[in-house]
Amino acid sequence: MEGLLPETALGRLSGAFSQGDAQASGGGRMEVLEEKEEEEQREEEELKASDISDNLQDLEMNVSMEQVCVSSDVLPGSDFDWSSVDMSQLPSSYKTNSPKEKKLLQIADHFLQQYTHLCPDRKPLFLYPVNECGVEKFVSTTVRPTLLPYPELYHWDGCASFVSDYLTMEHLKSPITPPSSLYSPTTILKYQRGNCFDFSVLLCSMLIGAGYDAYCVHGYATREICTLDETLELCPLLRKPQEVPQQGMKKKSNKYRVKSPPDLQSKFELQQEAKKKAETEAAHKNEAREEKVVMEVGKPEHDPLYGLRVHAWVLVLSGKREVPEPFFINPFTGNSHSTVDEHFLGIESVWNHRNYWVNMQDCRNGCKDLIFDLGDAIRWEIMLSESNKPLQLLPDAEEEKELSDRDADDMQEKEEKDMSFDMPPSWVASVEISPRGTEVVEVKEWFKNREDMLDIREVNKQTQLTTEYFSPGHLLGLKAHTYMSLEPETERTIEFYNEVRVDGLQKLVENANEMTEYFVGRDDFLHVRHMEFGKRGKKIHLAGTRTDINARPIMQIKECFHRNLEKPADEDVAERIFLITEEMIHLTHHLKDKYITASKKDFFKVAEGDRKGNEMVMTPEMCITYQAGSSEKDKKLLHLYKLLQELTEEEKQLKQQVRQCEAEVLNILKIRENEEAAVKLSVSIYNTERNEKRRRQYEAMKNTVEDELPGQEEQDLDYLAPFLIQIGHREKITKWQALRIRDDCLADLKHRLINKANIIQARFEKAVEELQKKDQWFQENQNRLSALEEDDFLARYSESTFHIHILALRLKREKQMAAQKYLTLQEKLHKDPRLAEHLSHT
């Protein structure tokens, strides 16, 4: 690990500070620099070392920032603006430092100066970043031990799962340097997002509150750990639970024990079981070998920042809560890792709510050789010595300590008391999680190979709103369905693939009183149809009930049309409303150029009693018109009369279409209910093992062929039958006829082979041309595609490439087999008993 060198090259750091001054002490503590010449010499060395370190750091930044930081802008979670967070309601402890906190910052600053002086080759420590209010806070005071009142969070795996699931990951601004800020766990929980340091502080606070000996870790990890790349990890649903070996008690021999019954099991059965077990183990070994090969092939590319990527995680030491040995927790995934895991490449420092430790061990082999005994002053440099003392002593030990203290010198006791310093309490407010934080808000399900073409289902557990997405190919052309209940006449939105519908219906929105249809690409320019219904006495309960029985009364039908440029604007209807209960029809035309009002017509239909027979009587009072740009009324009653007749007839047709639309919705609900009640999977017709329908068809066809009359199969498969028909089925054929049959049969085969090759060639050329167009489109639009769209394009591109490869193989095989097929047929013709007499000598 670059920057973590052996302790012999680094020297030692002091572990005890008093008011910012280092005190001479045992256990690897640094001696005070007193002589002036020595100070000047060290200052010169420090300047040289700092210059070299700065140059190396600048070089690393120049190499890495171009490769990594540019791409970090498009990573998930990077679009949240932390500057917009409201800080006005935060407590005063977030905005100011207490006198004890200020003293701690002075000690930390002095500690950092000596660390930088003695370890110029190492990276700066992560000690006192600013919080959300821009105030410097020591990292240990940001940890707030918290025990939350939920049984699920009493164990480490529950806490880790909560943190990884509840928070949204944000990447570090620079992958090779720690962040400049560290927000409080309360703010991180409120906005449900943070980087690896935020995750670790929150998780460490919860683990310490639950009784674990937990620490935050500042170190280095692989690219997969830092970026949450789990593409090479095994699916969590396929992971086998870890087997915990059970330690059994050793049985003592007893000469009076009851003798075991004789073994009556068959030795042959034992041999067979052993043989089967050996075969199973061999199969498992082969699978493991194949998986190893796959893993070798699927290894990620070399990371140019390997060993430099900064990461934060949690260390849990043994001792408390029956933890048998130390282990790591990756806060992004909530998974535990061994301390020798090769994905963790080194440690700079660790801290909890009481103290801060710097790692002084060699990390060239990652964390494999590290010893996590924080009391070892050789391997771990502690910042505050007082906090390293035991928290509790047994009564006897306390009594002995009291006696020894009485014999100690009073002045020395006073000096030791003066140089001690306890960590101030955490400045973070009480961490609380409301019960809503543990509730499931949304459930998302993905499906594949379903006959109903259902792909995704999203269910909002709070509103019970369900949204289903379908792939093209559904029986009813469904694209999406949003609903709260499958009961009819409830709120829902149904989207269709309008390309497969004759009426161009794209979307349908319905509730108990209204229904709206949206259309695309219609010849009549209709794009919206809105229907309003009235109340009725009895409600429909069963899907599929006839709509003409106690149907909802239609109160109003409104249609909106796009502009038809082939008509004048004042004759092109933009909106028409059929007020059925009021016996009115309202027309609004499109706006003419340079006009702010549109032409309108209002028709009042004649009641049934006022009509003369079946004919409608038209009077000027039955129509009110407004012609934009003209003050005179249209006096041509004949034109208005014909228009009213057309509108009345269209109103009848619209009523029928509304009833048909209601029936279609009921049919959709019934079909979806049946599809969910009995989910069926689509199986390829070539998969005869799982495709039961195809297998039954094949067996039925086979049985039919076997039941046919003898000789029928030969008659159906007679390759000369089409040619024998041309000369009539004669028992004796001449030589000339035999030669004609041979030539015609060979010519027919040649023609079919050439046609087949031409068809494959045409398909091959078309596929290559389409692939070239796709590649050109991708080159032009690559920068505008999202990651999901790019992955989808690459998948389709791979399928096209595979299809072209198959066509090329088929074409090559056809060309190679053509001559052989020709010769085979020629030989078969010469041996055919009907032609052999005349062809045997040719």
Image: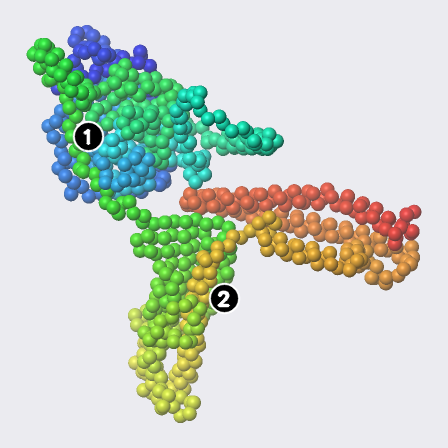
Under tag 2, what secondary structure? Answer: loop
Q: Is residue 265 left or right of residue 630?
A: right
Horizontal placement of 358 versus 834: left or right?
Answer: left
- Residue assigned mark 2: 502
Q: Nearer the viewer, residue 77 or 394?
A: 394
Q: Nearer the viewer, mark 1 or mark 2?
A: 1
Say which mark, if any, is on residue 406: none
Residue at the farthest bottom position: 612
Q: Would residue 306 be seen by someone viewing this image from the given angle? A: no
**Residue at x 48% of width, y 31% of height:** 299
Q: Earlier in the sequence, mark 1 or mark 2?
A: 1
Q: Nearer the viewer, residue 639 or 544?
A: 544
Q: Residue at x 36, y 31 (%)?
A: 336
Q: Quadrant of residue 275?
A: top right
Which amino acid type is shown beneath numbered disc 2? Val
Residue 639 horizontal/vertical position (percent): 41, 84
Residue 141: assigned label? 1
Dots 1 and 2: beta carbons under 8 Å? no
Q: Residue at x 66, y 45 (%)?
A: 810
Q: Under tag 1, what secondary structure?
A: helix
Tell me if residue 322 can be seen. Answer: yes
Q: Amino acid at mark 1?
A: Thr
Q: How many marks?
A: 2
Quadrant of the snapshot with the N terminus: top left
Residue at image x 32%, y 19%? 371
